[in-house]
């Protein structure tokens, strides 16, 4: 392992970016990173130093999307934290170096205190604030949209749509017309909006027309994500053909070039190897030796459930696995994040690859075995490698 004493996380608030960088000792950091960057204090070892948090404010939702991994299990989270408790959570996380927060659900717009919590996060000094919503209630929340226009933080609304075709989208999500109404309203108001789409066997062929559809709507950001089949009935939709996955990713790269400057297209369909990013990171010590390598769960990203407990990865809510024994408010954050047995059980496979092929792979310390949730739901164990790995197409 390389020396990490000179590695710090540096934050650019204007760009809404935080990255690891080798910047010398603490007295030199300000001069070395420049006026547009600030050094985030290190509170924990770099391999588990968090920078981002997702706060699951509620499990209640006005839709019933087939992909959802929390709302179907809302009985488990009847006791939601009140407003003041969520503010304490925001204080704790900021104190430990978190600078980007995502308010998510369920449907967070069902919480009457959402605007208050967003404003509080902005007042504390969070550099990036995200609202993950199904968009069906956006066009009736005029006061909230007016408020977020004046935040100091970089603010983005993230919503989901799987197709430009109503019947294709409604087969898994529903409320196509209401979602489009919310998207149009936010775009017309000049608020940054990102659309996330789950790529499946049912919709991958329509990706090019879907991207054009969003560009024509004025959407500026889009993410294409892999389906994680948390229920057996979802597996037919999961793309298990790695050659096909490669072809879809190649198509995405062409679409990125075609619409460059009009929409930022992020293809999250496989390991960094698949997207061509890993070669640039293999020799990057700052990337390799920090929580920016591999899956962010239990390392760079914190997930706080409605009742205040942490979960290593939200894809395991349905299994009641990898949840902390205590709420983040019932013990010190460090005791839970560093010492909780369930959190550490999940983290173990990310810090030390458990698949023999990952141990000898030149990309091993960058991808760290990929997505543990996909490994579990496809292979039955978090100790397996990500099934999307294209380095083993010959298998």
Image (spheres, grey):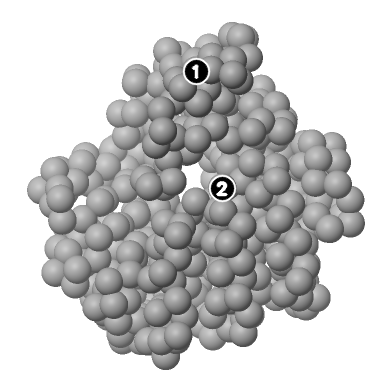
The reply to whether residue 80 is visible in this rendering is no
**Quadrant showing the C terminus:** top left
Disc 2: CA contacts within 10 A as few (<14), some (14-19) or many (>=20): many
Residue in front for this viewpoint, 217 or 20: 20
- The residue at 66%/31% (across/down) is 42
Find residue 295 and report its horizontal and vertical position in percent.
Answer: 55, 37
Instruction: Work out whether 237 lies above or below 246.
Output: below
- The residue at 64%/27% (across/down) is 46
Find residue 141 and report its horizontal and vertical position in percent.
Answer: 45, 86
Q: Residue furthest top?
A: 2
Along the horizontal axis of the image, is 274 left or right of 57? left
- The residue at 64%/41% (across/down) is 97
Lower position in the chain sequence, tag 1 or tag 2: 1
Along the horizontal axis of the image, is 34 left or right of 163? right
The reply to whether residue 214 is visible in this rendering is yes
Residue 343, image quadrant: top right
Mark 2 residue element: loop
Residue 363, image quadrant: top left
Instruction: Work out whether 379 lies above or below 133.
Output: above
**Quadrant showing the N terminus:** top right
Residue in front for this viewpoint, 301 or 101: 101
Mark 1 residue element: strand
The residue pinned by badge 1 equals 22
Q: Residue furthest bottom?
A: 140
Residue in front for this viewpoint, 215 or 44: 44
The residue pinned by badge 2 equals 99
Find residue 250 and report its horizontal and vertical position in percent.
Answer: 21, 39
| Tag 1–tag 2 contact (CB < 8 Å) | no
Residue in front for this viewpoint, 195 or 317: 195
Label placed on residue 368: none
- The residue at 61%/9% (across/down) is 3
Cα separation between marks 1 and 2? 19 Å
């Amino acid at each position: 392992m390389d020396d990490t004493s000179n590695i710090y996380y540096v934050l650019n608030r204007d760009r809404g970016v935080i990255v690891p960088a080798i910047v010398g000792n603490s007295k030199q950091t300000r001069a070395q990173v420049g006026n547009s960057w600030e050094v985030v204090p290190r509170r924990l070892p770099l391999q588990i130093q968090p920078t981002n948090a997702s706060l699951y404010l509620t499990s209640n939702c006005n839709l019933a999307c087939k992909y959802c991994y929390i709302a179907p299990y809302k009985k488990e989270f009847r006791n939601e934290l009140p407003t003041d408790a969520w503010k304490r959570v925001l204080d704790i996380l900021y104190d430990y170096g978190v600078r980007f927060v995502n308010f998510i659900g369920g449907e967070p717009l069902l919480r009457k205190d959402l605007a208050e919590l967003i404003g509080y996060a902005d007042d504390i000094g969070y550099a990036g604030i995200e609202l993950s919503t199904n968009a069906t209630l956006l066009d009736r929340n005029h006061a909230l949209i007016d408020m977020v226009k004046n935040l100091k933080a970089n603010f983005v609304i993230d919503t989901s749509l799987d197709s430009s075709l109503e019947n294709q989208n409604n087969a898994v999500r529903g409320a196509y017309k209401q979602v489009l109404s919310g998207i149009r309203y936010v775009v017309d108001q000049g608020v940054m909006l990102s659309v996330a789409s789950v790529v499946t066997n049912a919709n991958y062929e329509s990706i090019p027309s879907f991207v054009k559809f969003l560009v024509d709507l004025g959407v500026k950001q889009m993410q294409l994500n892999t389906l994680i089949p948390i229920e057996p009935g979802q597996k037919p939709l999961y793309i298990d053909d790695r050659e096909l996955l490669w072809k879809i990713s190649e198509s995405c790269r062409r679409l990125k070039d075609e619409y460059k400057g009009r929409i930022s297209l992020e293809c999250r369909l496989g390991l960094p190897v698949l997207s061509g990013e890993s070669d640039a990171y293999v020799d990057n010590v700052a990337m390799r030796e920090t929580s920016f390598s591999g899956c962010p769960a239990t390392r760079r990203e914190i997930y706080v459930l409605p009742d205040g407990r942490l979960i290593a990865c939200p894809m395991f809510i349905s299994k009641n696995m990898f949840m902390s024994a205590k709420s983040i408010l019932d013990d010190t954050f460090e005791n839970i994040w560093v010492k909780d047995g369930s959190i550490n059980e999940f983290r173990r496979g990310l810090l030390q690859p458990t698949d023999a092929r990952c141990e000898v792979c030149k990309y091993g310390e960058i991808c760290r075995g990929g997505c543990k949730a996909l490994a579990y739901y496809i292979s039955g164990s978090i100790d397996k490698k990500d099934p999307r790995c294209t380095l083993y197409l010959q298998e």
